[in-house]
Image (cartoon, rainbow, N blue to C red):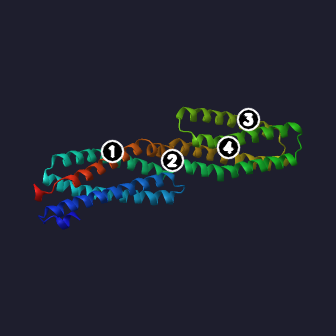
Amino acid sequence: MFSYYRGRSNPFETEFTKVNLLSTMRIHLLEAIEAEKNAVMAITDEASEDFAVRARKAADDVESSRKEIEAIINQQKLPRETEILNDFNNCWSQFRKLDETILVLATQNTNLKAQKLSATQGAQEIERFEQSLNHRNTNNHQGNEAVILSYEALTAGLKILALHKPHIEEADDQEMDKIEQSIKSYDESARKALGSLRSIVDQRDSEDLNNAETAYERFMNLTGEVLRLSRMNTNIKSAELSLGRKRLVSSQCQEILANLQETVQAQPSNATR
């Protein structure tokens, strides 16, 4: 828009251009804010990526208009408008840095990925673990001791699965440390029970026990990946930034733009000076 009026000397057209640029900036700023929030709240990688692209595009549009109006104001040398624009430039710099940090975190979706991994593959391996132990117990030839050991191992595994969710939802590193210590303790109990069961099992039950041990190993490998993704906490971190510091910066940028637009509209045109 500014390029169209660049060569014109009509002061009314220049003021009109500035007002239009500021209106456009405010619209695109709102679009950028909304798209960023949607990227944070999205529940799939595809949706997060889509909203992130929209947020970046809207922010780029704000930046394009900002450069145009900056060139006009610098040329006019109006102290008050220059002062307000400098305030916006400082705020806008913070906005863009925060925006990119949030969008990168949001599109990684590690908490959601951890939750999905736990609820699908993790739950499936525990189910296979349970089925193998139950089948072994149904065809039990070693008496109550083997049954008790089987249930001890299964109970420990189920408790580990149950701890996935609080770990994924936890934001504090020390609290996650405590959950991981509990997982480690239950893992030791499960392995101890399986080891004791192995020492008394006979050949007729070895296939079921092999299947149970294999399922448990796969489950614990998945647990390690769930904890790794959960530790990254990208969804929680992006949400905290979006609802905290980013919201304050966004409001500040909006207020400064509104103030600048009011100042521009209140300025007497060059034709009347």
Q: Position of residue 18 (x, y in %)?
A: 22, 58
Callout 2 crowding tier (Cα within 10 Å): few <14, some 14–19, many ≥20: many
Q: Is residue 35 left or right of residue 74?
A: right
- Quadrant where the N terminus is found in the figure: bottom left
- Quadrant where the C terminus is found in the figure: bottom left
Q: Amino acid at mark 4?
A: Leu
Which of labels 3 and 1 is toward the front?
1
Tag on residue 235? 2
Q: Position of residue 147 (x, y in %)?
A: 84, 40
Q: Residue at x 40, y 53 (%)?
A: 33
Check disc 4 and report the residue beneath it. Answer: 161
Q: Amino acid at mark 2?
A: Asn
Of the two numbered discs 1 and 2 on the same chain, state the one appearing first in sequence: 1
Tag on residue 94? 1
Separation of residues labelled 1 and 4 (CA atoms): 41 Å
Callout 4 crowding tier (Cα within 10 Å): few <14, some 14–19, many ≥20: some
Which of labels 1 and 4 is toward the front?
1
Q: Residue at x 51, y 47 (%)?
A: 235
Q: Nearer the viewer, residue 165 or 256?
A: 256
Tag on residue 192? 3
Cβ–Cβ under 8 Å for marks 4 and 2: no
